[in-house]
Amino acid sequence: PAPRRLPTPDPPVDLVERLVVAEPPLSTAQKVLVVAEGGTFRARLDGDGPNLGLTLKATRDGRALVQALPAPSRARAAGIRIGDEVLGVDGAAFERGVGLRHVAARIKASSTKVLSLRRGFAPVDVEVLAAVLRRRGALSEDGAAALMGEVAEVCRRAALWDERGEVVSDLDDVSVDVVERRPALCCRVVDYDAEAYAVWTLDARSGAEWRVRRSFARFREVRTIVKRLAPRDVYEDLDRTFPDEAAFYDTVSSIQERCRALENYLRSCLSLLLTGPLHNNAGRLHAALEDFLDVPARLASLELLERNPDAHLRRAAQVAAHQVLATPSLDGVVSTIVAACRGKEGHDLLG
């Protein structure tokens, strides 16, 4: 006979009470907290008057973020920063996508004005990044200047993608609808088995990763789509990097070189919406790349993972890294750093 299960004792009442009533730390004008990026906290808006001292903006996925803080303001005095996400008020969470008017009305109607927030992530300090790379010899002075301009443009487009579901050119009137597109896809061609290439894909927004196997013929189909949809100068620049088909006799070295070339080609194509010239077919081109990487079959699970609050820190770090590494000025810089780290001079380069 199966052994009789022993009764499980109940936890101490005082422990249960402490767990139930536990709340994030409170930041006030008298005691401003130091909150780590991605951390959850509360902030009390001390003072009277209808003005909250903060301006909110809505993201495409229904979050309410702090967009501006006039100086001085009640919100700034309480330690709230631009980019913080407003989660609720007086211990009650806002439903995702309720609208900014509802959020503002709930806060104004509150008697205590205690907001629940998640600390936002500081934007990439491009000047510091460029200065370090220039000082270590990884970028020239002209390259560092180009990097700062490119990262600024990438961050501008990424913000529009997140907030409005569109990407708008800073030079002309081209607007690309990207509501249904994934904004931070990264891929690597990691293997070849004589029949197909293994393409590893990371969706930085959700943290999900997967592999698909694609023949060289499928890569040629992508090349044809790029030729049909991209502007001629963009297509010609990309086409110079597309590798030749496998020879009758292949070597390990030639396979590795072809994998790297295919990988660079795909990554360059994926970054066009953030770094390249915008055109009327830009959204269709990105959709074709998502089809190649099998994104549509995983779309529901990606969106579900993206709403998981536990993945907030990892997701934001991945998206920031994707935005920086998508810039053309960093072509070759990362591989230079990796190669240096493998040699004796790695400490000198990165220290």
Image (cartoon, rainbow, N blue to C red):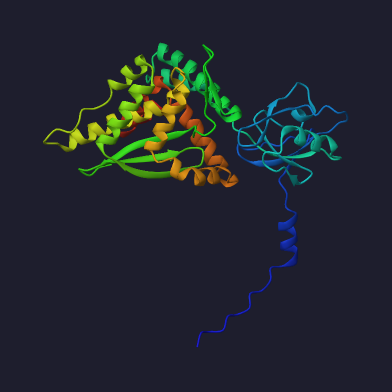
Q: Residue furthest left?
A: 249
Q: Is residue 208 above or below residue 238?
A: below
Residue 267 screen position, x and y as percent: 37, 29
Q: Residue furthest right?
A: 48
- Residue 63, quarter of picture: top right
Answer with left or right where residue 165 lies relative to residue 227.
right
- Residue 164, quarter of picture: top right
Front-most of residues 66 and 245: 245
Residue 165 screen position, x and y as percent: 57, 29
- Residue 94, quarter of picture: top right
Residue at 46%, 31% (x, y): give it: 322
- Residue 345 appearing in the image: no
Front-most of residues 84 and 262: 262
Residue 41 screen position, x and y as percent: 70, 41
Q: Is residue 332 above or below residue 182?
A: above
Front-most of residues 101 and 88: 101
Residue 137 screen position, x and y as percent: 37, 19
- Residue 193 appearing in the image: yes
Residue at 84%, 40% (x, y): give it: 112
Q: Residue furthest bottom?
A: 1
Residue at 60%, 80% (x, y): give it: 6
Quadrant for the C terminus in the image = top left
State the count of labels: 0
Residue at 11%, 35% (x, y): give it: 248
